[in-house]
Image (tube, rainbow, N blue to C red):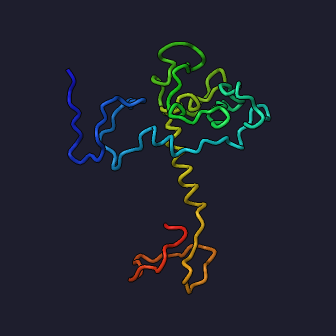
């Protein structure tokens, strides 16, 4: 017997017919204010690039072999997470828990990502592997990467004043920006919309 999925009256999400790839461990007490992106859409927003700061025995992603993608460095960082382009690790799998990971290498159900807590994401096991590198779903690695890359993008956008501006640009932001928009629209759109 299949029970119908009935979303709350205020829900903005449509129900899906298939279960999620990484179900939540404990539902929240109340629905979120805005729905989160699906893992597939989230993965599409993440850059498929190699981290220029990643090192394994002094070598960067460009110097390491693709055969080493499942290895980790002395900081417990899994190569394929940081050398995504080199390791071709850019699909939805990069946001999911690794089903082959067992904490301390002990193959037991209690040592899987499913049984771990988000508070354990920062710790290393006896083999020197950092939990968040393998329990990517539990530790919300992709969500944090997306938030980080979107906040970095916002900081790096150039500010381009309209061509007809009569004010000189300043080096620092205004102490109190205007709250009311201009009465009439500009003649042409700006090169960098806000």
Horizontal and vertical percent position of residue 167: 57, 84
Position of residue 63 relative to residue 31, above or below, is: above
Question: Residue lying furthest right in this view?
Answer: 58
In the rendered view, does 126 fall on the left or right side of 95?
right
Horizontal and vertical percent position of residue 185: 42, 79
Residue occupying the point 70% across, 28% down: 66
Q: Is residue 21 visible?
A: yes
- Residue 65 is drawn in which quadrant? top right
Q: Can residue 119 be seen in this view?
A: no
| In-front residue for pair 72/89 | 89
Q: Quarter holding the N terminus? A: top left
| In-front residue for pair 131/66 | 66
Residue occupying the point 65% across, 32% down: 87
| In-front residue for pair 40/106 | 40
Residue occupying the point 45% across, 77% down: 178
Horizontal and vertical percent position of residue 78: 64, 30
Position of residue 162 relative to residue 70, above or below, is: below
């Amino acid at each position: 017997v299949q029970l119908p999925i009935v979303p709350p009256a205020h829900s903005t999400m449509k129900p899906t017919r298939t279960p999620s790839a990484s179900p939540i461990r404990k539902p929240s007490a109340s629905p979120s204010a805005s729905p989160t992106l699906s893992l597939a859409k989230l993965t599409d927003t993440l850059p498929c690039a190699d981290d220029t700061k990643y090192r394994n025995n002094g070598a960067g992603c460009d110097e390491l072999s693709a055969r080493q993608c499942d290895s980790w460095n002395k900081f417990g960082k899994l190569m394929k997470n940081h050398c995504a382009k080199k390791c071709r690790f850019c699909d939805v799998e990069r946001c999911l828990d690794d089903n082959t990971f067992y904490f301390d290498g002990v193959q037991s159900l209690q040592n899987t990502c499913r049984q771990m807590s988000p508070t354990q994401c920062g710790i290393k096991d006896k083999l020197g592997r950092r939990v968040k590198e393998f329990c990517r779903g539990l530790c919300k690695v992709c969500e944090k990467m997306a938030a980080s890359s979107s906040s970095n993008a916002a900081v790096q956008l150039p500010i381009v004043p309209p061509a007809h501006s009569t004010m000189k640009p300043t080096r620092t932001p205004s102490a109190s920006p205007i709250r009311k928009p201009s009465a009439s629209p500009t003649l042409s759109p700006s090169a960098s919309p806000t």
